[in-house]
Image: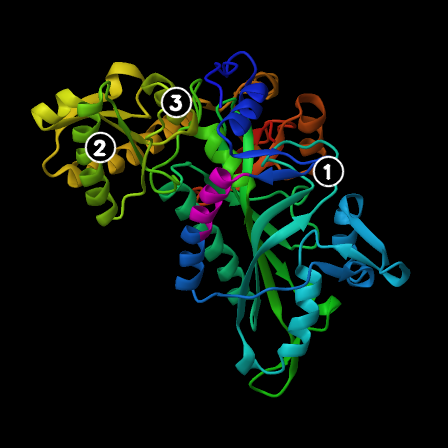
Amino acid sequence: MSNEKLTPRNVDFSEWYNQIVQRAEMADYAPVRGCMVVRPYGWALWENIQAALDKRFKETGHVNAAFPLFIPMSFLEKEKEHVEGFSPELAVVTIGGGEKLEEPLVVRPTSETIIGAMYSKWIQSYRDLPVLINQWGNVVRWELRTRLFLRTLEFYWQEGHTAHSTEQEAREETMRMLQVYTDFAVNEAAVPVIPGIKSQTEKFAGANMSTTIEAMMQDTRALQSGTSHFLGQNFAKAFEIKFLDENNALQYCWTTSWGLSTRFIGAIIMTHGDDQGLIMPPRLAPIQVVIVPIFKSEPETAAVMETVARILTELKTTGIRVKVDDRKEVTPGFKFNDWEMRGVPLRIEIGPKDIEKGTVALARRDKPGREGKSFVPQAGLSSIIGDILTDIQKSMLARATAFRDSHIFEPKDYPELTEVVQNGWAYSYWCESEVCEAKVKEETKATIRCMPLGQEESHGKCIVCGEPARNKVYFARAY
């Protein structure tokens, strides 16, 4: 790996992002156009994301299962809005085993249809409900413009699919899972997201209502980072998902679906990274602490490595994810840059002088240069490091939140909105007309990201047309 400098964010944010993903060995371009190879370091981060989410899913009563990668084309055609929404992105298999297939198979872009077909078999009575299933897997969407993690032909995700006996229960599930995503993003990834409801134009194809968590990247663009959909009875009617209620009457189920993908890795990179590379939130970082031994002569080596081994054992015992960089072919300076590129939250440097003094040198990744350096005693080191990691997590969230809030504006009129969305978000009243929504998109490339939850009831005038409006929305350019 080279120590060559990254393109600065303020020169070319897109190029900075592409370089960081490859140089930090998160992912690489695959031989198939638009696909990526997730490298071990990137996959380790995804595994930590999976573990944090999976724990939350299970705590809310969900169980995991696996459904096929191939979906009969006729399934997608059963829900009109769904097939219209996905048809431009479908990958279709027409030949299998050298023979033309009787019915083409779609490589799953999402699983509402095939899971709906199974639920119609499994659900007979109100006693079978609710069904709360999640699956971890991969999906394929034939995207024209791709970017590592953010938008690729094939990506990894989880998709939850639930069936309920009442509309209220399904709506509660939709909002519960949105809250799970919000909690995960804020508390595990230190990404301050805004939960809200999508406009009808921006909602998931086949849903009655889509909710989302929206995050601001450092170029002020929005990134849709997770979605939760109330599907009403659309898929239940398309796939005959029915149950006998307590009065022995046949009813259609109410269903939901929700998902978060490897795109969230892009959110972490673009929310926290700097011109030296990644900055990993400690709670998700594959490696939380890296130890760099420093020595010049053979006698020094033995003493330093003995102390390193002891500290390594102590940190591992307390559950800290730690690695020793004992490479002999590169200099300490190279190692420092290497681990800064990879965003490891905390670096410990141990040399002969540290052993004499009974101390270690620490370098925080979230604070550049001298500001992040300190010397601490070796005694009680695991406790000190635990506290520092907690503080890094907290300060990363505070910094990202301050950046976001300083780039959200409330323009006084439409001309000001068109200026604001070039380098920030506009928070404005909207009359809920698709005409006004389309005008903003056409003239500024900004879309309605969400109508945030928990707004106090108020009245104003639509920023676009001046007609009465009851809700404010965020307008922003997005990935």
Mark 1: few, some, or many residues within 10 Å (few <14, many ≥20)? few
Residue drawn at point x = 9 percent, y = 36 percent: 379
Specify the quadrant of the image occupied by residue 29: top right
Q: CA distance from mark 1 to mark 2?
A: 45 Å
Task: State left or right for residue 453 relative to residue 255.
Answer: left
Q: In the image, residue 115 lies at what x, y percent?
A: 66, 66
Residue segment shown in magenta = 39-50
Give the labeled residue for mark 3.
329
Q: Position of residue 204 (x, y in %)?
A: 66, 49
Q: Which residue is mark 1?
A: 32
Q: Residues within 10 Å of mark 2 (few under 14, many from 20)?
A: some
- Quadrant housing the C terminus: top right
Which mark sits nearer the N-terminus, 3 or 1? 1
Residue 149, horizontal then vertical, whole percent: 58, 36
In this rendering, would 154 be left or right of 416? right
Distance, label 3 to label 2, CA atoms, is 16 Å
Residue lying furthest top in this view? 11
- Give me the residue at 63% from left, 78% from top: 122
Q: Which residue is mark 2?
A: 305
Give left or right: position of 210 versus 20.
right
Q: Quadrant of residue 164?
A: bottom right
Q: Amino acid at mark 3?
A: Glu
Question: Compared with residue 74, is residue 451 higher up or lower down, i.e. above or below?
Answer: above
Residue 163 painted magenta: no
Label 1 vs label 2, nearer the camera:
2
Q: Is residue 77 shown to the viewer in this render?
A: yes
Comparing 186 with 291, the one in front is 291
